[in-house]
Amino acid sequence: MYKLIFDAGPLITVCKFSISERLVVDYLLERCEIAIATSVRNEVVLAGARYPDAQAAKSRIDDGQISILSPPSNPALESLIDVYDLGDGERDSILLGGDSDLHDATLVIDDHLAYLVSDRLKQLKRFLLDVIVDLVNNDELNKKLAIQIIHAIQTRYPRAFVEHTLRLLER
C-alpha cells in the first residue's frame, strides 16, 4: 500500500473536495496509508476547526484512518530547514520525510518552497496531483475517477499544473 506523509495543504484539499458526495480523502484512504505530523494536525484541525475540511480531517484522525506522527529529533537537519523559514507543518513534514523508519513513505507537499527544500534534501516527495497519476499508473485508481478528482480539486492549483496532469493521464 502506498504510504504517504501529507503536509497541511494537500490534507485540506483532499478533505475539502468531493466526488459523488464522497470526499477525495476517502478514495485515497482506500488505497493509501496517510500520516501527518502533529503540527499539521494542529494547523488543520485545531486552527481551522470551524471549517468542514478540518472536521473531516479530525473525524478520520479520531477513527485512526489518518495517523499522527511526531518528527524525529534531528538538530542538524532542523537547523538547516529553519534557514528557509518554513511553517511548522512544512518543517515537520520534511523531518518526517527524512525519518529512516519511514523510508518507504512519500512526502505529499504542494508548497513550492517546501517542495524545493525536500528536493535539496533528496527526499521522496510528490505533489498531490502526481500522487493521483501514480495511483493510476500502479492500477490502484481507475483513470475516470482520477480525472474526476483532478477536476474536483483544480481550483487549488495553477491551470498549467492541472492541464499537465490531465495530459499525463491521457497517455
Image (tube, rainbow, N blue to C red):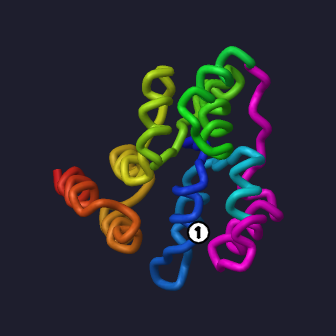
For label 1, the SS is helix
Residue 76, position as x, y percentages in the image: 68, 14
Is 49 left or right of 106, judged from the image as shown? Answer: right
Q: Which residue is mark 1?
A: 15
- Rendered view: 81 above or below 75: below
Residue at image position (49%, 38%) is 114
Query: Does the stretch in magenta take in 10?
Result: no
Residue at the outermost right position: 62
141 or 79: which is nearer to us?
Answer: 79
Residue 81, by quadrant, is top right
Is 57 left or right of 125, judged from the image as shown? Answer: right
Q: Amino acid at mark 1?
A: Cys
Residue 37, by quadrant, is top right
Residue at the outermost bottom position: 21
Residue 101, position as x, y percentages in the image: 71, 24
Residue at image position (42%, 46%) is 127
- Rendered view: 103 above or below 38: above
Residue 154, position as x, y percentages in the image: 34, 68
Residue 83, position as x, y percentages in the image: 57, 26
Is 155 left or right of 164, judged from the image as shown? Answer: right
Check disc 1: other Cα within 10 Å, few if <14, some if 14-19, many if 20+. many
Residue range of the region highlighted in magenta in the rendering: 46-74
Q: Quadrant of the N terminus?
A: top right
The number of numbered badges drawn on the structure is 1
143 or 45: which is nearer to us?
Answer: 45
